[in-house]
Each structure stands twice: as structure tokens, then as C-alpha cells.
Amino acid sequence: MCNHKNAGILSVGSAVPDKVLSNADLEKMVDTNDEWIRTMTGISERRIASEGEATSDYATKAAKVALDRAGIDPSEIDLIIVATVTSDMQYPATASIVQNALGCKNAAAFDLGAGCSGWVYSLAAANSFIKSGMYNHVLVIGADLLTRVTNWTDRTTCCLFGDGAGAAVVGPVGEGEGLLGFELGSDGSGANALCIPAGGSRQPITHEAIDAHMDKTHMEGREVFKFAVKIQGEATERVLAKVGLTVSDIDMVIPHQANIRIIDSAVQRLGLAQDKFFVNIHKYGNTSAASIPLALNEAVEEGKIKKGDTVVTVGFGAGLTWASGVMKWVY
Ligand code: UT7
């Protein structure tokens, strides 16, 4: 047992497939067009995993980058959390597969399912494990291959999603820096608004279910949109209030990349400059639990986040869940 009080992100990394699916490609698959997709969602293209690849492949790649950057040996990792809704198999946990691939022989491992909020939920869990003194270094990974569960005949959803992974090494940091606070929530009354109806214990897979695309993502887009617009601003304001900060203290917001109009609504509500919201949705679409760490990694790589910055991460998704976190960047 160790006894550290504060936890922070020590490094980040990401991985995406090479294969690009553009809006022009989608025009050939369903009745849609580039202008509708870009105007209504902000997405220009997304990445698609190749046949035979799995979520753990990208989770492992992203984690390797983060481990290298932190200069931490895999044996020093005490816990791996993989936030995902597209695990390699129904069970075991994808985190166990990642543990083996990385050689993190001293690590516990579990998956966390909170939809697109999953990575921020996992970060909050890592923070608690470290603060309690139970663990020292935790790998927090968000990884999803949503295109594996996309109904490619449904134009209302198939243009939205993409594949990828992002990872962070979380460990002990000094007083007053690192992870400052979290706001997590769920409204299960919206559980059916965004789900894969078949393939679980309620409705096992049958030929009929597959023919009806019940093994793929179903979404009440409008309902989720309204929820997202409301909760994104609220969750940001609540987490700031919890740690005694205000919107004017924010240097950078890393929002879940679901729809540029949802991000723009937060820009309006919070009254922040547009460039304080990091956006990369045009390149990757909605990558679910990977979306926030993928964006965070790019923001860091582009020098948009520096030591001492106040960074807010905010996500929402299936559940319906939401999660926000605020941190003082440590490197
Ligand atoms: O990660 C968290 C989960 N997901 C989200 O956050 C997504 C939340 N929802 C959304 O982003 C939006 O609801 C969508 C982008 C999915 C849809 O935007 P919307 O403003 O809710 O549009 P809509 O579904 O009401 O559709 C407007 C029109 C409809 O035509 P009519 O009925 O007005 O004639 C649709 O049939 O746009 C049509 N439409 C399309 N047209 C061209 C729907 N999808 C397409 C498409 N291409 N791909």
C-alpha cells in the first residue's frame, strides 16, 4: 500500500485506424450528402478498423504511447481500466486482454461501461484508487470500435461514428495540481434512447434480431441531442462550483465529440471563446469512450495545453450518463 493524496495525468497517448471513411464514401452507401453531415454534425470523415482488428488492439497502442511518454515500465502499473461499450468479446474484460498485451503483470484490470462518459468515469475511479492509497499508477483507457456495431443502412446513425482509442497514465502528483474534482451522473430513464437492443441477457441474439439490425446501435437522436445540450453546460458548471472555480478560470475544455452543434451550444451557454473548446470531430466523428482522451491527446500534442492550465473534460452518452472533471495540468 502506498499513501499518496493527489493524482494527476502524467501522460497521454492515442491510436486510430489508418483507414478513412469520408462523407463522399458514405454518399455511395446511404441516401445522405456531405453538406448535410458537415452542417448537422461537423463530421467530414471518420476512421474504420480493419477486419480482424479489435478494441484491445487500439487500446494497447494508445496505452504504449502513454507509458513511453511517462517513462513508466508496464510492471509499475497497478490497475488498468478500459472504458468501452465495444469489448473484444462479451467477456472477459478487454482490460485483461490489454494487460496481457502490455505485460502489466502486476496490474488488476476491469472494463467500465458508461457509454461516451466512460473515460471520465474511469478517470474519477483512478483518482479515488490513488487518493485512497490503494494504487499508485493507473492506466485509464477509452477505446471503442463503434463501427462494428453500426447499422450501415441507417443514415440517421451511420454517418456519426468512428473508431479509436486514447489513454492516460494517472499517478501521484503534488499538492494543488492534477485531478481536482468530478461530477458523475446517470438518468436511467433514458436507457433506451441509445442502446444495442439485442445480444444481451434481455434479448439474446437470434437470426430475426440480426435481420432487424437489433444487434446494432439504436439512437433517438433528437432525445439524446436535447439531453446533451442541457447536461454539457450543467455538468461543467457543477464541477467548477465543487472545486471553487468559475468559468473564467478555464483554459481549455475537452468536450465529448458527438456533434459540433452540441459543442457550440456549450460555447454559447458558458460564454467562453470558441478556441477554448478543443474540437477534432471533423476528423474522427463520435468515437464514444475514446473521444475525450483522443481530443485531449491532440490538444497536448498541438501545445494547446501547458503546465498549470485549468482543463475541463465533459462527456455524456448511453445510460444516459454524464461526467465532468476539472484538473490542473501537471506537465
Ligand atoms: O455520444 C452521444 C450520443 N450521440 C449524440 O450525441 C447524438 C445526438 N444527436 C444528434 O447529434 C442529432 O440528433 C443528429 C445529428 C443525429 C440528427 O440531427 P437532428 O437535428 O436531430 O435531425 P433529425 O434527426 O430531426 O433529422 C432532420 C432531417 C430529417 O428529415 P425530415 O424528416 O426533416 O424530412 C431526417 O430524415 O434530416 C434527415 N436526415 C438526413 N438527411 C441526410 C437524417 N439523417 C440524415 C442523413 N443525411 N444522414
Image (cartoon, rainbow, N blue to C red):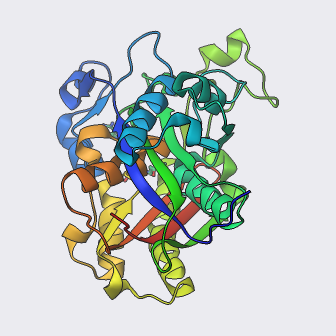
Name the spot of residue 226 as percent of width and height, x first: 48, 63
Residue at position x 75%, y 28% from top?
200
Q: Position of residue 76 (x, y in %)?
A: 57, 42
Vertical order, 282 against 153 (above or below): below
Kindly indicate the quadrant of the structure image that contains residue 188.
bottom right
Residue at 72% across / 25% down in the picture? 92
Q: Is residue 8 visible?
A: yes
Tell me if 283 is positioned left or right of 132 in this view. Answer: left
Question: Residue 186 versus residue 76: which sits nearer the camera?
Answer: 76
The count of marks equals 0
Q: Is residue 325 left or right of residue 32?
A: right
Quadrant the N terminus occupies? bottom right
From the viewer's perspective, tell me whether residue 112 is left or right of residue 175. right
Answer with the quarter of the image where residue 158 lies.
Answer: top left
Residue drawn at (78%, 26%) of the image: 203
Residue shown at the point (34%, 31%) measured from the top left = 16
**Front-lying residue, 304 or 116:** 304
